[in-house]
Amino acid sequence: KAGVTQTPRYLIKTRGQQVTLSCSPISGHRSVSWYQQTPGQGLQFLFEYFSETQRNKGNFPGRFSGRQFSNSRSEMNVSTLELGDSALYLCASSLQDSYNEQFFGPGTRLTVL
Amino acid sequence: ELKVEQNPLFLSMQEGKNYTIYCNYSTTSDRLYWYRQDPGKSLESLFVLLSNGAVKQEGRLMASLDTKARLSTLHITAAVHDLSATYFCAVGANQAGTALIFGKGTTLSVSS
């Protein structure tokens, strides 16, 4: 069974630009969550999508947004990039329930110059 | 607001010795997870603990959950170099959905 895939794996952008990251969950998984990992703040929850609806949202500014498609693939978008947005962005998929195990993708390393 | 604290944050271990990592969380939750992360890699799921008193073991690692004390432990038996990594505990935010609140991680270094 294929795991969670994320594209691109690496990205370099400049301040003020916007970026879109993609996540394909494990086949059959309907929930996709996004996390930001930085050395200073650690792993922080961004948002979760389930059946094309945002089910939960973390404490991030509105520049961070996401969506989920009918095939459960998800994208997250960051507009007006800031230096502090440089991070590893991880997505995780799970079947559907809060109690299901979450499986993480390899991440997208975003560098903002 | 749910907070998750791990300690220690760094652990230098000798091969063959036993160690314990502690994970405390601040508000009620009914699910706790342990993950491993190798440098430059993603998170690998180790254990899912869903009930008070749950204990799970895999190889040299054993995890337990005490929901009344809001405490989980990850016990390492007879450490080996391959266990060198960063270990995270994560607690389910007490709401519908799969949001996890992570601890800051414990970086283990096992030397002979």
Image (cartoon, coloured by chain):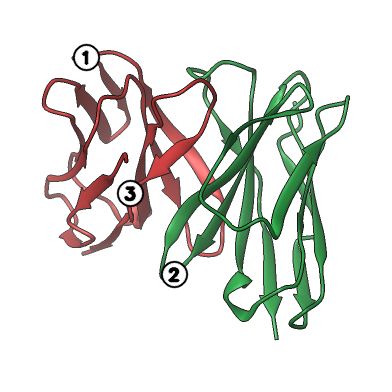
> Which numbered dot is residue A81?
none
What amino acid is found at the position of numbered circle 1 in the picture? Asn
- Inspect the image, locate mark 2, and give the three-letter code of the amino acid beneath it: Pro
* Residue B33, x across and y down, in percent: 38, 32
As drawn, which residue projects farthest toward the bottom?
A113
At horizontal 62% and vertical 50% (from top left) the residue drawn is A90
Residue at the spot 76% in from the left edge and 21% down from the top edge: A51
**Front-lying residue, A83 or B35:** A83
Disc 3 crowd rating (10 Å Cα; few below 14, some 14-19, many 20+) is many
State the image coordinates of residue A40 (x, y, percent, origin top left).
41, 70
Q: Colour of chain A?
A: green
Q: Name the subunit of mark 3.
A: B
Q: Which mark is residue B52?
A: 1
Q: Which residue is mark 3?
A: B103
Which residue position holds label 2?
A39
Is A62 on the left or on the right of A45, as rendered? right
Task: Give the chain of mark 1.
Answer: B
